[in-house]
Image (cartoon, rainbow, N blue to C red):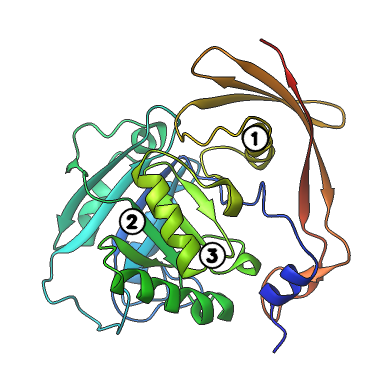
Amino acid sequence: MSTCTTLSRALAEPMGGTATTGAGWLLLEQPGPWGAKALTQSHLDPALGRALESRARDTGLRIGLIRRPGRHADCPPNPSRHVFLAHTRPGLSWVRELRTADPADLLDLDFAALGAGAHDGVGSAYRGDPLALVCTNGRRDRCCALLGRPLAAELAAAGHAQVWETTHLGGHRFSPTVLVLPYGYAYGRLTPESAKEVLAATHEGRMAPEWCRGRSYWEPAGQAAELAVRAHTGEDRAEVLTLRQTPTVTGWSVAVDHRDGRGWTVEVTAGVSLPPRSQSCGAELVTPARYEAGPVLRTR
């Protein structure tokens, strides 16, 4: 069976620079079925879903629904739902957790502050294992269900307690896709074995370059530049690199700084992936953006 994932693999499409951009995340437990637009097409009140979308717009805060792997009962055993708040800025990343019996209470949060990295003491600091968010929304793309759900189930069965199915991470053609918090690195084309390596690395404060699509805090060109520096230096510690991205005539000049004082520049250009391909199963053929990182030049 030909799918968007098999075509992407056959074309050896690179994953760097394809992570969904979001400085912060608000994740709400919502059991039951999800539609393609899950915030308004699930058993969450659609009016509340629209209100959450509206409040989050232009704040840098992305909203996702989450549920435990396995059978999807309409209601959790306990009506109190998990909520996770996260911020992914390098060196200042955090995750907070709380529970709510009424998701409408989330509208009282300061979305702009959360997107900017200020949690103002909401909830409590999350100190558990890394959060693994596996995209499984088959209504959005069948590959996410066919490949994501078995991966989430196997990770949970292996004892990874903080594995959650989630609604949308972008990049269906790289399924199964996973976002790991607190650092916000997105990964694609994972197997159960490589996913376990990703979680082990995150637990140790590292990222896993081999399967990485980018850090969600950065725009795509910055993601590509960071991964290029990591490939050049072998650096895999998650929190040691920051960057500044400047537009140029041909793309972007990205300055990447290391916590130890080293620095590099990377010129990134935007092209398209050829031949045309579907970004999602059943979608029209397009030429997705492709971010090419040039040589990594040491500046200090």
- For label 3, the SS is loop
Label 2 crowd bin: few (<14), some (14–19), many (20+), radius 10 Å: many
The disc labelled 2 sits on which kind of residue? Leu
Q: Residue 10 is drawn in which quadrant?
A: bottom right
> Vertically, is 298 above or below 66?
above
Q: Earlier in the sequence, mark 2 or mark 1?
A: 2
| Residue highlighted by disc 2 | 27
Q: Position of residue 80 (x, y in %)?
A: 13, 65
Placement of 110 over or under 249, stated as above or below = below
Q: Quadrant of residue 247?
A: top right
Say what amino acid the circle numbered 3 marks.
Answer: Leu
Residue at 35%, 51% in the rendered image:
26
**SS type, badge 2:** strand
- Amino acid at the residue labelled 1: Gly
Q: Residue at point 33% right, 56% down? A: 27
* Image coords of residue 281 (percent x, y): 67, 78
User: Can you tell which mark lies on residue 222?
Assistant: 1
Q: Distance between the residues labelled 1 and 3?
A: 23 Å
Horizontal side of residue 165 vs 256, given as left or right: left
Q: Which quadrant would the N terminus be assigned to in this image?
A: bottom right
The residue carrying pointer 3 sits among few (fewer than 14), some (14 to 19) or many (20 or more) residues within 10 Å by Cα, namely many
User: Image point 42% across, 47% down: which residue?
Assistant: 201
Question: Which residue corresponds to mark 3?
Answer: 190
Label 1: state its secondary structure: helix
Query: Is residue 124 visible in the rendered structure shown here?
Result: yes
- Kindly report which numbered mark, 1 or 3, lies closer to the viewer in this rendering: 3
The answer to whether marks 2 and 3 mark residues whose Cβ atoms lie closer than 8 Å is no
